[in-house]
Amino acid sequence: MPEVKIGLQDVVIATSDICAIDGQKGTLVYRGYDIHDLAGHATFEEVVYLLWYGRLPTADELEELELQLTGNRSVPPEILDFLKRFPASPEPMEILRTAVSALSLYDPEASDMSEEANRRKALRLTAQMSTLVAAYGRIRQGREAISPVPKLNHAANFLYMLNGRTPDDESARWFEIALILHADHSYNSSTFAARVTASTLSDLHSAITTGIGTLKGPLHGGANEQVMKMLLEIQAPERVDDYIHSLLAQKQKVMGFGHRVYRTEDPRATVLRKMSEGLGVRAGQTKWFEISKRIEDLMIREKNINANVDFYSASAYYVLGIPLDLFPLVFALSRISGWTAHVLEQYANNKLIRPLAEYTGPQNRKYVPIDQRG
Ligand code: COA
């Protein structure tokens, strides 16, 4: 029996051309481009194209993608109706998971497994997911969903559809950078799960539904919401030390810290730290950044554990007016671009993903009739 690697830690299970992470150096690269380069210059739409096609688009290709996204943002009215009928959920990721699964029932190409149809579905899902999240954010408050507007890009459209007003350029750009940073992360748990589903040659909506269900967990995309709950509980920088010491004394995890792959700073956290600070200063709400910075300093000083992508995104999203229980959904509406890129890559060169487990249960038992069991 080969060596058992619990949690698949450090196991290389496939090759991929999409995303490279160097956990020792703290680098993240999409298709050969460093994440800092992309966050500094690219639009989210360019990054989506890059992830799907392996290269940056020409001006014409980008314009075509933007037009396609704009033309596909609307969600079928039946799905909006579903959102109104669903019972309120303390975990809106349940709503997203269910709504995305239901979208396949209204997608005429849902079971068409041709590459062209899968690319069109990837585009539709990417366009529709942000509309879904924003619509749910309003519908659950008894407000009407707002239709997307063609003149705004993907990032600005989401904030507009959620908050009902066009965001200022700086907020929209920061949010776009957050989307770029969350777009892909190699074989993270949700992407891996989506690829497992795709590897059975199940359809794209099923693979993405799997991804959403996996992202939902607090050890993955659910961590950003937990971070903000912690910041709200702490409320003041001078209360940080007692709060965190108490968590650590109880052997509890501090949400937003630690990573399976990075042994140094997560490069996304470097950018998000600036975003949290910049947005906080602009909004006159520096408290959340100050509390975060103090937690980070303590965690590095005393535990040598770094912040991950979910730590500073929490305070940044909060200042942007995004309700905290929607934070994991915001993660999903960016990661859909990476999930779909990976599912397309899986279909293009498929091999069923089916590992082994070492059996450690009882052996050689004999069936005992029910009336003879003690
Ligand atoms: N707070 C406190 N201690 C932490 C920690 C955290 N956030 N993350 C890791 N550690 C400690 C563990 O207690 C463990 O210590 P031990 O060896 O003394 O028991 C050690 O670091 C290794 O952690 P482990 O959970 O085994 O590593 P992992 O690779 O399996 O887990 C995470 C990685 C991300 C799941 C883990 O760091 C975590 O739970 N973080 C909080 C949730 C989070 O922010 N998730 C988003 C990830 S992007």
Image (tube, rainbow, N blue to C red):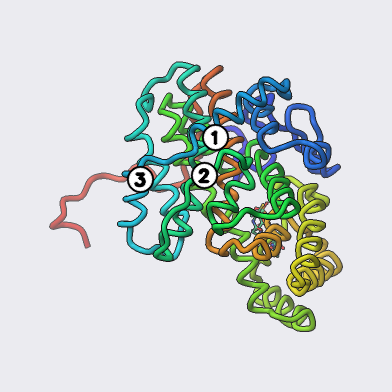
Q: Secondary structure at mark 1?
A: helix
Residue 320 falls in image quadrant: bottom right
Is there CB contact under 8 Å for labels 1 and 3? no
Q: How many marks?
A: 3
> Which labelled disc corresponds to residue 148?
2
Disc on the earlier residue, 2 or 3: 3
Front of the two marks 2 and 3: 2
Seen from the viewer's position, the closer of residues 203 and 274 is 274
Ligand 1 sits in quadrant? bottom right
* Residue count near mark 2 (Cα–Cα under 10 Å), binned few <14, some 14–19, many ≥20: many
- Callout 3, which amino acid? Ile
* Residue 202 against residue 297 in the figure, above or below: above
* Residue 79 against residue 310 in the figure, above or below: above
Q: Secondary structure at mark 2?
A: loop
- Callout 2, which amino acid? Pro
Residue annotated with mark 3: 79
Residue annotated with mark 1: 70
* Residue count near mark 1 (Cα–Cα under 10 Å), binned few <14, some 14–19, many ≥20: many
Is there CB contact under 8 Å for labels 1 and 2? yes
Residue 371 falls in image quadrant: bottom left
* Residue count near mark 3 (Cα–Cα under 10 Å), binned few <14, some 14–19, many ≥20: some
- Callout 1, which amino acid? Thr
